[in-house]
Image (cartoon, rainbow, N blue to C red):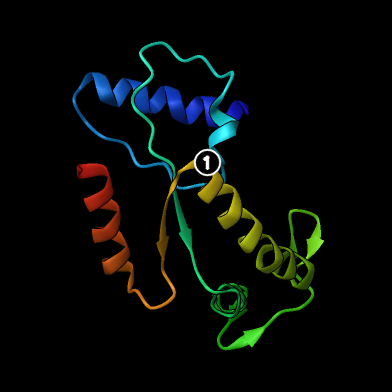
Amino acid sequence: MKELRNWLEIGAKSAKKNVSTIICGFAKRKDFSGIAVGDMPEIEVILLNAEPEIVRKRLVGRYSKNGVFDESQKVIGKSVNEFIEGNVWYCKIMEKECIEDGCKIVNTSKLTPEDVSREIVSIIGA
């Protein structure tokens, strides 16, 4: 919560200058309740989602070096394999929660990073 509050304060300072701030992280709409930041800007929660196998493939790529996957790595205190499988498992739960909370969802499975950027801009620009 401390980190989220910090980012919201950065967003509030930027909003005073009429500048939008995009914060990319792992938070749900309910994480924002109870956090009071002076002059809190409007918040739009957008889930960047992908099919489970795409999530797995992307994370394996992130933890590979020169095409070799290093299974001995630790991520937030877990083996990299456990971390990846946890993320793959949780992506469907996160999607369900976001649907229930009325969040926007962008399925990135077949999108380039540029396409994802355009989708985000179209959502926050609306």
Q: Quadrant of residue 35?
A: top right
Which residue in the rendered view is the most extreme toward the front?
100
Q: Nearer the viewer, residue 103 or 41?
A: 103
Q: Does dot 1 land on a helix, a strand or a loop?
A: helix
Q: Residue at x 59, y 80 (%)?
A: 53
Quarter in which the N terminus is drawn: top right
Question: Residue 10 appears at what percent x and percent y?
Answer: 39, 26
Q: Nearer the viewer, residue 70 or 32?
A: 32
Q: Residue at x 76, y 78 (%)?
A: 71
Q: Quadrant of residue 48?
A: bottom left
In this rendering, the answer to whether 103 lies above or below 38 is below
Quarter in which the C terminus is drawn: top left
* Amino acid type, label 1: Asp
Q: Nearer the viewer, residue 117 or 70?
A: 117
49 sits left or right of 125 in the view: right
Q: How many marks?
A: 1
Q: Residues within 10 Å of mark 1 (few under 14, many from 20)?
A: few
107 sits left or right of 124 in the view: right
106 sits left or right of 70 in the view: left
Question: Residue 65 appears at what percent x and percent y?
Answer: 59, 80
Q: Residue at x 62, y 73 (%)?
A: 63
Q: Quadrant of residue 9?
A: top left
Q: Residue at x 62, y 63 (%)?
A: 92
Question: Residue 2 appears at what percent x and percent y?
Answer: 61, 26
Q: Which residue is identified by label 1?
A: 101
Q: Nearer the viewer, residue 124 or 62?
A: 124
41 sits left or right of 74 in the view: left
